[in-house]
Image (spheres, grey):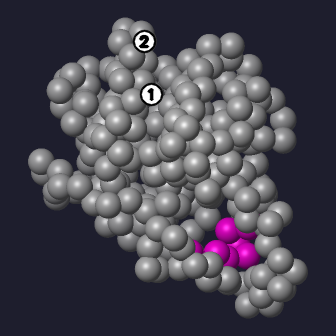
Amino acid sequence: MTEQAQQSPDPTPLYIEKPDGARLAYHKLDGRGPTIVFLGGFMSDMTGTKAMKLEALAREQGQSFLRLDYQGHGQSSGKFKDGSIGLWLSDALYLIDQVTDGPLILVGSSMGGWIMLQTALQRPQRLAGLVGIAAAPDFTEDLMWATFSDEIKETLQRDGVYYEPSEYSDEPYTITMKLIEDGRDHLVMRERMPINVPIRLLHGMRDESVPYELSLRIAENVECEDVQVRFVKDGDHRLSTDRDLEILSQTVASLCDASV
């Protein structure tokens, strides 16, 4: 779920301090609305290929744009092991509230797709559209806890932490019992979501981390009828090939144009 870093035209981030003392790193482009907001994945940061592709699109179109690092990710303060879905959601909401105005197009990658849906539910008046990339709502419960062996569950309950090997990084995923329990307070797939803006869902059919069928379930689970799901048959979880990035760019651009 981590991505190769890409060089930004201005690699120095801006910072904002939350009331809880956390220092959040972000990059912001000023421009016309709607503001594109990129929400990254689990153990990823805001310098990945998809975030940078969308920044390039925003520069080209004169579009307002925001990318950010949650606490314990990238250049923001905090330790990853202390994080949770609720904490990272609060980071995204704080930055959106403090540094953007007007309509938003939220783009959520993997875990960021869960943050995206929660943000949509909590800021419905700000929405212009959503784009999910291998969106993974409720993954802590359905893709982690539900698939863990009894031994792993016992480790989490005894030690409070389990280190899961990652195929995307030399560093293992740090999974805490806090992450699992907090995730249960933020589940979105257990009931119909009152989201009524255009939604576009992109998913690779060779995704070994998040089943592509989950994008179909999201489409069925929102009230909006303007939902399109696009599968990439040979696409993996990252969807970061040049072709994949062009699909993403075109998808976001068309939503921006339609919202004007």
**Amino acid, disc 1:** Ile
Q: Is residue 254 left or right of residue 56?
A: right
> Residue 170 sits in which quadrant?
bottom left
Q: Which residues are magenta?
A: 173-181
Q: Which residue is mark 1?
A: 105
Pointer 2: residues within 10 angstroms few (<14), some, or many (20+)?
some
In the visual, does 59 lie left or right of 211?
Answer: left
Quarter holding residue 105: top left
**Discs 2, 1 touching: Cβ within 8 Å:** yes
Circle 2 residue: 259
Residue 67 appears left or right of 225: left
Say which label, 2 or 1, has the lower sequence index: 1
Q: Position of residue 126 (x, y in %)?
A: 50, 25
**Above or below, 192 relative to 88:** above
Residue in the picture at 80% in, 66% down: 147
* SS at badge 1: strand
> Which residue occupies the foreground of this view, 20 or 229?
229
Q: What residue is rendered at 51% in x and 70% in y?
A: 167
